Image: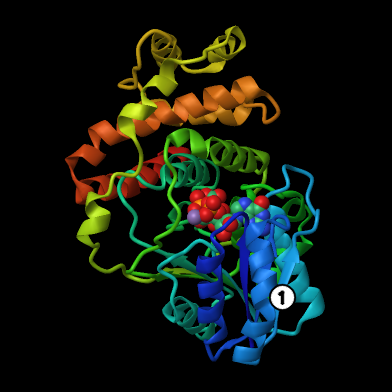
Amino acid sequence: MSLVVFPFKNEDPEILIRNVKIALSHPRVEEVLCVGASEDRCFVALAKARPTLEKEHGKPVKVMVQERIGVLRPGKGDGMNTALQYFLQETNHRRLHFYDADIVSFSQEWISKAEEGADQGFDVVRHYFPRASTDAMITWFITRTGFALLWPKSALPWIEQPLGGELLLTRPAAKGLLEEERVRRQSDWGIDTLYTFTMVKHGCSLYETYIGVGKLHKLYGALTDLKTMLIECFAAIQSLRREEIPQLGTHRVEYPGPVSQQVREKVGYDVEGSLPLLTEGWSQEEESLLAVLPKKVRTGMQACRSFPKFGFMDEEAWYATYAALLEHFEPSSPHWHDLLFRLWLARTLNYTVNHALRGYDHALHYLHQMVGRYVNRALGR
Ligand code: GDX
Ligand code: MN
């Protein structure tokens, strides 16, 4: 009754094939679809393994290149939307599961837990995991912050991992997503934001299921690797800023379990290596954009040109900065890209030094409370 989809780009084929086998072995799964960004090395390896996989499991396995559906950078959004289209137009399966292709801790439990949520009647099931206190810096400072500022009354700010690529959609929920033009346009990293926003806007009931083993996957080195993702995730939220969310759907979150020592001690990024990114490569144009930011932030960022500084970018300063960015950021301007990255980096470093340093429990509590304070502030309380 279910289709499992893995979008992929330049992944290790061994890991992906292993994940395909896990999915095929699950009794609820009738078919697996892998949507590649192009005919890369991983695609070729997978296409070669396909007949054997089908024979061993007696279930169809499809391998395809994503279609050009959207209008932004062709990325994961085109991959996911290609899968939605296939699911709705070419099959009769009742449910669709998405999983990232690079997960090494994937197991049948992920599928079972999502199916259980859907069996309870939820339209959408999203997986969430324990994450290191310095991981998920886009989620906390871009996505959840933006959701709190713009839609404080909705479930959006309270969704644990709004950018997660692991989720189950029932057929009506999938149909609702693909029918929205702005979802189809979003071919880049903004797709997760658009899916999350749209399912809440449509009033889908949402269950978040907790996966205690966590998501072990390919790691990023420097924070610069995240720059494109950061820009596309912010631009996606900005594009929605005039939208209203009329109704409140049910939102239930499974209670989390104890967090492993490994996750509690993990350092999410290279702090020392990130410091020069605050000072290097300022252009005249970038500097002139500081004019629209709050005074304290403007002065702080100007000082960064000669020495890395971030003490000024506290919770309050970030709220005001974010509001200014929503109004002034230009998605097509490379100078705005550079400045957004630097502002976010200053916020990330400020949080790391003032909160992450105090230990895992303090840090996670702080981040959740921060979202709550932003919600209250946005409501004018
Ligand atoms: N078809 C297709 N086309 N798949 C892609 C493309 C693309 O252009 N780019 C990336 N992918 C796949 C990739 O192979 C992997 O399976 C998944 O998408 C996620 O990419 P990854 O490089 O592993 O990113 P990361 O940081 O682990 O992703 C997480 O954050 C993203 C986000 O914040 O936007 C993850 O939760 C993603 O699902 C989420 O989109
Ligand atoms: Mn990954």
Where ligand 1 lies, by quadrant? bottom right
Up-down: is 29 above or below 224? below
Up-down: is 24 above or below 69? below
Q: Amino acid at mark 1?
A: Lys
- Residue positioned 52% across, 73% down in the render: 19
Up-down: is 306 above or below 212? above
Q: Position of residue 174 (x, y in %)?
A: 69, 70
Image quadrant containing the N terminus: bottom right
Q: Position of residue 260 (x, y in %)?
A: 23, 62
Q: How many marks?
A: 1
> Quadrant location of residue 62?
bottom right
- Residue positioned 71% across, 28% down in the render: 332
In the picture, measured across the screen, residue 254 lies left or right of residue 327, that is left
In the picture, measured across the screen, residue 100 lies left or right of residue 171, that is left
- Residue positioned 39% across, 61% down in the render: 216
Up-down: is 167 above or below 156? below
**Residue identifier under label 1:** 62
- Residue positioned 53% across, 35% down in the render: 227
> Quadrant location of residue 252?
bottom left
In the picture, measured across the screen, residue 104 lies left or right of residue 58, that is left
Image quadrant containing the C terminus: top left
Residue closer to the observer: 79 or 60: 60
> Quadrant location of residue 32?
bottom right
Residue closer to the observer: 102 or 191: 102
Q: In the structure shown, which secondary structural element does the residue marked by tag 1 occupy?
A: strand
Q: Position of residue 133 (x, y in %)?
A: 30, 47
Which residue is most to the left? 358
Residue closer to the observer: 41 or 91: 41
